[in-house]
Image (cartoon, helix red, strand yellow):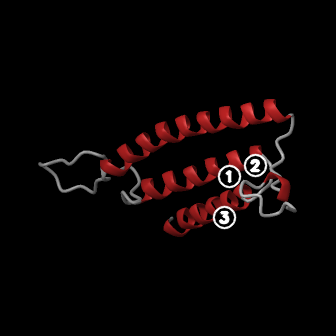
Amino acid sequence: MEALVASAVGIMTAAGIFLILRRRTFPVILGLSLITYAVNVFLFATGRLALDAPAVLNKYEEVPYTDPLPQALVLTAIVISFGMTAVIVMIALSAYLSSKDDHIDMTAKDSVDGAGEDA
């Protein structure tokens, strides 16, 4: 079970990094979402991978339990990542509407310091 979860986290992280390095805005947004999913699965797995175990301690019995703190962290991370994704989508949409293209193309004429221009 642990190898499966570790593989899933690694594959989602690798796919997210691959998508972030693209030159269009939509794959970048998908890549950020994949990385946040990978972090959420990693945080969830830190609370022990126990099946059918309660998240609350029982003081009368000695039963295996699941740590509730990573579950609370994952819920908080889901809310934050949803807000972050909404903001990024709105920024990408406004950039697309202003330039009619979502291609990220930094050329010498677009540089801020003007290093590529002839004086």
Q: Which label sits on residue 31?
A: 1
Report whether 70 appears left or right of 107: left
Nearer to me, 7 or 87: 87
Q: Measuring from the top left, give residue 97's x and y in whole percent.
A: 80, 29
Give the residue pinned by disc 2. Answer: 27
Residue shown at 49% from the left, 67% from the top: 2
Q: Is residue 8 above or below residue 33?
A: below
Q: Which residue is mark 3?
A: 14
Q: Residue furthest bottom?
A: 3
Q: CA distance from mark 2 to mark 3?
A: 13 Å
Query: How many numbered discs?
Result: 3
**In this rendering, is residue 118 above or below 51?**
below
**Callout 3 amino acid:** Ala
Hey, what amino acid is under mark 1? Answer: Gly
Residue 88 % position (x, y): 63, 39
In the figure, 90 relative to 22: above or below? above
Query: Seen in the image, is 90 located left or right of residue 24?
Result: left
